[in-house]
């Protein structure tokens, strides 16, 4: 499939797909006309990449773990190196800290809204 169809099927911009290719996350064959041609499996691969990015993993780590993904949600490392395990643990810990920070900020905003809304509606808190 061409890049436009892949973009439509994945909800991902063409520019971002080209970036994924540049980062070695997806591959495409080139036709005689120079157009990219992607396998159908690339649709699932883009979904995996987007999920990992949404989870906060950087592309340098995604590139290393993509070969270990069996399915859209399965992560399997038959020969995980201590370095890879340390890297993943570090990313997990970074995400945990980020979640704590986001939760704290969300709670602060909720408390602010709880104080401000009654005043705007003419009520006292």
Image: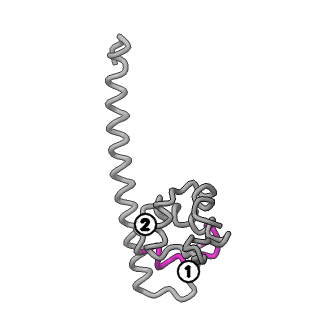
80 w.r.t. 92: above or below: below
Q: Residues within 10 Å of mark 1 (few under 14, many from 20)?
A: few
Q: Helix, strand, or loop for circle 1?
A: helix
Please identify the quarter of the rendering in which residue 8 is found: bottom right
Mark-to-mark CA distance, 2 and 1: 15 Å
Label for residue 57?
Answer: 2
Q: Which residues are magenta?
A: 61-74
State the scheme by which the image is colored. one colour
* Residue 88 percent coordinates (x, y): 43, 74
Q: Residue at x 42, y 70 (%)?
A: 59
Q: Residue at x 39, y 69 (%)?
A: 91
Mark 2 and mark 1 lie on one chain; the one further toward the N terminus is 2
41 w.r.t. 98: above or below: below
Magenta span contains residue 73: yes
* Residue identifier under label 1: 67
* Residue 41 percent coordinates (x, y): 66, 71
Q: Residue at x 55, y 74 (%)?
A: 34
Q: Helix, strand, or loop for circle 2?
A: loop
Locate residue 30 relative to residue 85 in the image: left or right. right
């Amino acid at each position: 499939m061409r890049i436009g169809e892949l973009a439509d099927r994945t909800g991902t911009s063409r520019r971002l797909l080209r970036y994924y290719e540049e980062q070695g996350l997806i591959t495409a064959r080139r036709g005689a006309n120079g157009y990219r041609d992607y396998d159908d499996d690339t649709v699932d691969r883009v979904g995996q990449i987007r999920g990992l990015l949404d989870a906060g993993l950087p592309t340098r780590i995604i590139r290393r773990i993509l070969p270990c993904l069996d399915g859209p949600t399965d992560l399997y490392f038959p020969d995980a190196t201590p370095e890879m395990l340390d890297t993943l643990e570090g990313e997990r810990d970074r995400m945990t800290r980020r979640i704590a920070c986001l939760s704290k900020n969300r709670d602060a905003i909720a408390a602010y809204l709880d104080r401000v809304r009654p005043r705007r509606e003419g009520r006292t808190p």
